[in-house]
Image (cartoon, helix red, strand yellow):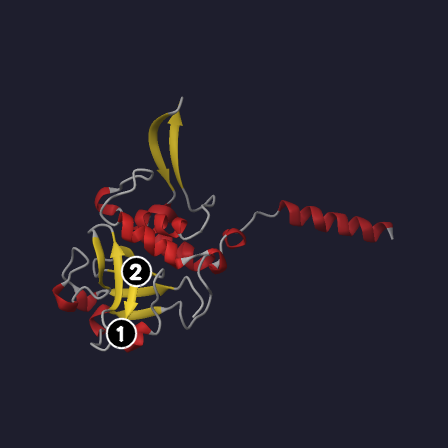
Amino acid sequence: MKNFLALILVYVMVIACMPVKAFAINNYTSYNPNDAVTYADTYWISYNTAYPNNGNHDCANFVSQCLVAGGLTQTSDWYVRDIKVLGVHIRWEQSDAWAGALALAAYMSDNFTYHNPTVNAYLGYVGTYQSSDTYYLSRLHPGDVILYKWPSSSYHVAIITASSWLEGSLITQHSNDRHDVCYNYKHNGQYILSHNDALQTEFWQHSMSVF
């Protein structure tokens, strides 16, 4: 009996010492996509001074802010910190997962998103856009995040802020600042990215809700 109790005690100690994974803090049930969209609508061009402004590389920083507004909690791997000395701002400290497009998408996929292969998936090439948008409308929902890969092998992220049969799936983003434009930047001449390479741009969806 003593040996059994000792084993139980060791097991409890081991569990207590294990690091807490991000998904233990954040999951799709703690995320309110409407709040994330409201934040994006508010700060897409009027930047929130409570966060850093990363200039021409602000897309992931902006999406991360939207996710926090939606209810996700910063973690030891996904964070932004205001470094101060005697109450005076010195600099911003941002993790790769907070400020990097690909790193953010990978971190969300591992920790935050609803793990369902039918809604968390590679969507193909932007150039395969169909005018009816039926396929994508069944998958893309406000509050979801899209990762773009340009032919130059650089990456970009944006948040979906509207989805309707009339307008299609619309995104909001920083760098370049855009609000409620079609996720396919070749559509109706509305270019959401700084590169005119729609036919070669790949994208992935990271679903934040259960559908």
Residue 13 x, y percent position in the rendering: 70, 46
Q: Residues within 10 Å of mark 1 (few under 14, many from 20)?
A: few
Q: Is residue 83 left or right of residue 193?
A: right
- Side of 2 where 94 appears, left or right: left
Residue annotated with mark 1: 165
Q: Residue at horizontal 31%, vertical 70%? A: 123
Secondary element at image label 1: loop
Q: Amino acid at mark 1?
A: Trp
Determine which residue is flagged by label 2.
161
- Which residue lies at the image location 42% right of the left edge and 46% below the top edge? 78
Give the residue at the far top of this rendering: 86
**Distance (Cα) linking label 1 and label 2:** 14 Å
Residue type of the residue flagged with mark 2? Thr
Q: Is residue 132 above or below residue 62?
A: below
Query: Where, by quadrant of the figure, is residue 163 drawn?
Result: bottom left
Up/down of 186 relative to 176, above or below = below
Residue 205's spot in the image, x, y percent? 34, 65
